[in-house]
Image: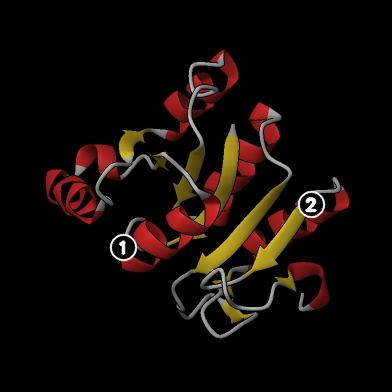
Amino acid sequence: MIKGLRVDHRLLHGQVAFSWTSYLEADCILIANDGVMQDELKKMAIKMAKPQGVKLVIKSIDDSITALNSGVTDKYKLFVVVESVKDAYRLMTETKQFHNVVLGGTKATENTKSISKAVNLTSKEIDLVKDLIAKDYEVEIRMVPTEKKVLAKDVI
């Protein structure tokens, strides 16, 4: 059962590992990211951030889509974390497993626009968010579970 999908450029860190995993009552975290698969140092850091008693799986985006569509993840209370809106968009539109996504933290760059304190999106990412909203997905912005939910459609 999918408990949540979160976009966070830091992937797994204290805030995600503990507050969100506890809040969602997840027993498994799936890090869906192509870059981590090639970076042993990043992979090791993610493994160190994993909460005790929670299974951690790291897969590429394509392998994550395959696993989610196969049903092999159904036995877990699964929390999925991706690095980008593009990755979330792929998971949401290519699996039918998700109804909403939480935008948690995305890096500010010269090509991004700030839509909240910690969420910065490129024009392409804004278009993807708008497309998700048009397809009746809920896109929310929240750093931690105790914050008030802000809907992306209200700030874009």
Residue shown at the point (58%, 43%) measured from the top left: 3
- Which mark's residue is nearer the viewer, 1 or 2? 1
Residue shown at the point (47%, 59%) measured from the top left: 20
Q: Dot 1 corresponds to which residue?
A: 13
Q: Relative to 69, is 111 above or below?
A: below
Residue shown at the point (53%, 27%) measured from the top left: 65
Residue 62 pos. (x, y %): 47, 27
Sequence-wise first label, 1 or 2: 1
Q: Dot 2 corresponds to which residue?
A: 131
In the image shown, does 24 or 62 lie closer to the viewer? Answer: 24
Hey, what amino acid is under mark 1? Answer: His
Q: Relative to 30, is 44 above or below?
A: below
Hey, what amino acid is under mark 2? Answer: Asp
Looking at the figure, which quarter contains the C terminus? bottom right
Residue 121 pos. (x, y %): 59, 70
Count of labels in the image = 2
Residue shown at the point (55%, 75%) measured from the top left: 120
Quadrant of res 35: top left
In the image shown, does 90 or 141 lie closer to the viewer? Answer: 141
Helix, strand, or loop for circle 2? helix
| Relative to 26, 124 lies left or right | right
Q: Alpha carbon of mark 1 to alpha carbon of mark 2: how far?
A: 29 Å
